[in-house]
Image: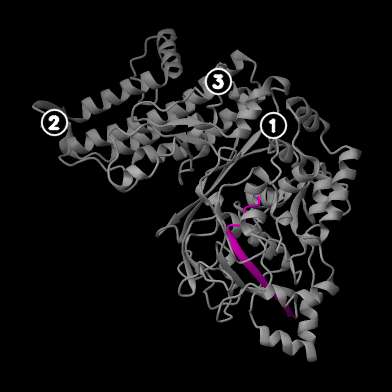
Amino acid sequence: MPPLGRAAARGAEAILAFGCGAGKSRARVGAASDKEDWERSVSFNLLDDPWLSVQVVDPSLPAGTGEGGTVEVGVGELLLHAERYRDLVVDLPTQKPAILRQVLLPVLVDALGYPAGAGEWLAMLRAGGLSSQQRDTLSAYLEEYRGRFDLFDPVDPFAQVSGLCTAKGESKGAALLVATAATGNNVPLFASRTEGDVLELTPAAAARWLLHTHCWDTAAIKTGAMGDPRVKAGKTTGNPTGPLGQLGVVMPMGSTLFETLVLNTPFGRTRLSDDLPQWRRRQTTGRILDTLSCALPTWLERASRGPLDLWTWQSRRIRLIPEQTPAGTRVTRVVVAAGDRLTATPDHEPHTAWKLTPAPKRPRTGTAAKRPVPAVLPRRHQTGKAGWRGLEAFLAVEREQREARGDRAGFRTSVLLDQLGGVRDRLPATYPLRVELTGMAYGNQSAVVEDLYFDAIPLPLLALDPEGPVSASLLEAADQAEQLAAALNHLSGDLMRAAGSEPIPWDKSQRPGETLLYALDSPARLLLLDLRAEPEDFDASESALEKWEHTAARHTWEVAEQVLATTAPGIFSGRRKVKDKTEHVYRLATAEQSFRARLRVILPRWAASRLAARLDAPPDPTPLSSEG
């Protein structure tokens, strides 16, 4: 369907209204009101109008606010000159992957194609910006599809369905699009706004939250739209969350937005003919099974045709309703209905790590036997757990490295990190790679947003070599942190048993190990930066690890002393317990002795330096402190 002009739009508006307000449309033929004329004339084109806030790299730009300052631009300016901007500035961290996937990446790839191989991809990354030929090709593409990016086009609004409405002509407040706003059952704790408060979104904000809704919307019941044959009793049920809500998003980031776009572009892919972005699937005639159109209330449950289809997946049918206010054009009402459903997360999904599921111990019976068990599932982020604690999954760049065994799940890194690991030797070892991790935790049958996950970790390129010393060092440090936390929890548990009680359950209250992991967060990130600065220097890596172990030991003893200081008087003599016909004695002395022994095993460099200091030091009658 070619882009339509506004003159043709007036005649086609009633046709695409799917029976909504037909009588009212006939009334407009006789005498159009000023409001109706305004509704036809209002426009906000995402290619030209500023709606993306970006950090400026060059402070000399007239529109910039200096180094690290921000400016708002449209898609055209951003893509044609992406090297001028450092990063997107968003209202919520989950908006960034939505904007990159729904607009920036698919426009770039659909216009220029995938890089043919690693060589072409590396040349593009090293160039630091588009060539003049690429800019001409991209400019021609933007001009060809300019009409498809109008947020308020009366016939073909961007990422929406024109005339979408319910049988009763109802709409809801714009807060329905905003994940942090109170609406329905989704009421954030300590929210300053209630559902009764009108939320007025500027066209720029409405565009950002529109894309966010397609990617992260909550599940469960959605409003039934006219023209949707699957509507029952005015609603649709069984709606899943948006596609990103089912992933733990992993996005490699560069030093400029151009580098970020290249890092997030797969190379060497063969593009299928029907792998198209949503703005090229807007037909309003023909069988939807053939056209895969997302311009109609009807939706499909299907597999994605490729990355472009997947990135611009229309998981909801949406209509923004603009209004003229004293402050300008604002969106205060929306219609959000059911949209396309993915049958499964495809293996060409580039922005998630994977969990390899082990084979079930027992044969599945009954209805469970009819449901296939996916061998590979997206690995979701765990809220409250820092990204560096999950490095074992991100560094599993070889397909056979972390296979599932027995009842233990295996890991596989993301397609993009795997791709980057394959060309690591052809890039500077000190390249400032950063990995951003984003996710959402849902509650109450995924019908409400319970928590949001975001973390950014500096990652040395050489860490993507599974046989290299940097990878081994990072995995060792992450494992040491977990073992130290477990040692503190064992100490606390032994002391509580000595006092006659039971240890704190893992899911009840906060255990001392969690306090330690929080304290180790900054030292762990400093270790990542140290290893990224000198990744090829073995002595520097060993020095960084020794520094890490000394810091970790100090923080561990600070938490341990708090645990020891709260012990009850009776634990000096201890208590005896019989378990499995074996007698165990729990007392302060044995608990502390066991804890010290664990520390020496977990932190060998710290223990060796401590022992060396003892041997080199002159005899001293003063006993060593607990910290050594």
Q: Which mark is residue 466?
A: 3
Q: Main secondary structure of the magenta part?
A: strand
Q: Which residues are magenta?
A: 312-325
What separation in Å lies between label 3 and label 1 (alpha carbons)? 19 Å
Please tell me which of labels 3 and 1 falls first in the chain. Answer: 1
Residue bearing mark 1: 432
Quarter of the view holding residue 272: top right
The spot of residue 415 in percent (x, y) is 60, 33
Residue bearing mark 2: 573
- Assess disc 2: are there few (<14), some (14-19) or many (≥20) residues with their C-alpha within 10 Å of its C-alpha: some
Residue 106 relative to residue 593: left or right: right
Marks 3, 1: nearer the viewer: 3
Q: In percent of the image, x 64 and y 29: which residue is there? A: 419
Answer yes or no: is residue 33 visible: no
The spot of residue 16 in percent (x, y) is 70, 72
Q: Amino acid at mark 1?
A: Pro
Residue 84 relative to residue 574: left or right: right
The spot of residue 86 in percent (x, y) is 75, 44
